[in-house]
Amino acid sequence: MMQRLTTKLYCGFFLIPATVILAISSYSVFSFWRIDSRIGTIYDDRVIPLQQIKNISDAYAIQIIDAVNKANSGLISTNAALNTVNRSIETISTNWESYKNTELTPEEKAIANDIERLFLPAQNRISELQQVLQRGNIEELAAFDGQLYDVIDPLTARLQELIDLQLQVASIEREKARAVLNETLLLFGLLILLSIVIASPLGYFLSQSIANTFKQTIKAISESSTEIAVATEQHERIATEQAAAVSETTSTMDELGASSEAATQQAEAAVTGAKKALSLSESGQTAVNSTLEGMATLQDKVEGIAQQILRLSEQTNQIGNISQLVADLANQTNMLALNAAVEAVRAGEHGRGFGVVATEIRKLADESQKSAQKIGTLVSDIQTAINSTVMVTEEGTKTVRSNVDVAQKTAEAFLGVKEAVNDVVVNNQQISLNIKQQTLAINQVLEAMNSLKQGANETANGIGQTKKGMEQLKHIADELESII
């Protein structure tokens, strides 16, 4: 579509106007060349020869005659008159040769031949005049006063005919130049009229075609932006649910961490009590009552530990459920991101930015799913540890009760009590170790939840950017549609 639009713009705004301008310019240059040729003919072949003929006529009729008359009247010397005559002869010769080198019409050639025949008698009389002026004899000049007119007047008359012919030919050339100008103006008018007749419907057709292309593009952009907006709203809703689930899970893990710390303290206290009971059993019969009281205290603490472990098991089950919910949300986010990527591909170039955001959302969803899997694994480990702890606790309780019975029956069972207390110490140490492992697992779960929370925040930011970009895209499409 863009290629077709580029072709239309190229044809409408460059190719067709350039062709019309080139045609008009070419004909203008050709017409100006024709007019210039006519003007050059008038000037080179008529005006300059006209000046040359006039110089020849003036040299004969004015300069030579005037020099003879002034010398005869004594106004100038014979040497001055001779110099004037010599310059006039040189002027006549130079201008006549230049004139003959121009392009002559047949009529001009005929008159020029007659003039050259008249040059001979005139030149003879002027040669005689030059001799008289060289001698400086004023009396002989009177004889040339009328004789020069007899040979110069026919010559100047023919020169005048040649001048008239130059003017006539120049007038003809002027008419030819005017005809070229009129022809050029007429053709210019026709070309302009033809351009208007052709350009008006063609321009309307191209403008409508370009407008239709823009409308189709705007429609496609609007449809794509609407679909992407729907997908964005779904992503935003899922991100909100995911953030709420992560917050709830984080709170639960905090409570679980506190419970784990309490269980650790109780386990350490149980170990201390068992050691005290062992010390009391070694003291003898007199310490049996104290031992019984210590055993009772130990039994209460073990039962408290059992209760804490049961609570820890329940909370672990809650974490498993939340982890499964997070995994389900990650799967839904991944599917929605995949749908958004498909819609971005359908949008083409305009959806490329949203496609990048959709890809990032899919990555975050994958990371969330992996984190949920890690949480599930950790929960499974915690449950295994809890089951082991329950078994150990039950065993410790049984041992304590057995030791109490033995202590009540006989003081000679101190050795058995000592061994039983040793077993209790070992079991409590195992409980403490298990609780520490649970604490470590809980910390790992907290780290995973923080990572999941960060991923949820980044997902929300990406959705916000996508939503903002789609609003800007729709705004631009609306403005473009209103312009068209």
Image: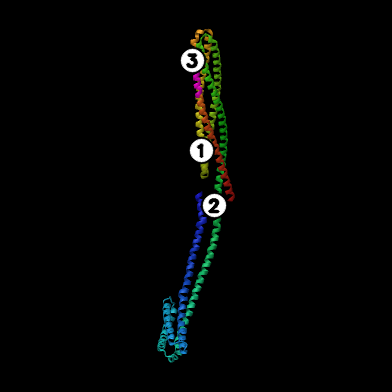
Reply above or below: 180 against 454. below
Query: Residue 360 bears which disc, if any?
Result: 1
Real-space Cα distance between discs 1 and 3? 57 Å
At label 3, the amino acid type is: Asn
Residue receiving disc 3: 422
Q: Nearer the viewer, residue 421 or 9?
A: 421
> Regarding mark 2 in the picture, which secondary structure is present there?
helix
Earlier in the chain: of badge 1 and badge 2, it is 2
In this view, the residue farthest toward the right is 482
The residue that disc 2 covers is 210
| 29 w.r.t. 468: above or below | below
Residue 420 spot, x, y in % from top left: 49, 13
Task: Please name which of the two marks, 1 or 2, marks the residue nearer to the observer.
Answer: 1
**Within 10 angstroms of label 2, few (less than 14), some, or many (20 or more) residues?**
some
Residue at (54, 62) in percent of width and height: 194
Tell me where the magenta segment starts and ends, as one range. Answer: 428-437
- Mark 1 and mark 3 in contact? Answer it, CB < 8 Å: no
Residue 415, image x and y in percent? 48, 10
Kind of residue at disc 1: Glu
- Circle 3: is it few (<14), some (14-19), or many (20+) Cα within 10 Å? some
Residue 112 % position (x, y)? 43, 81
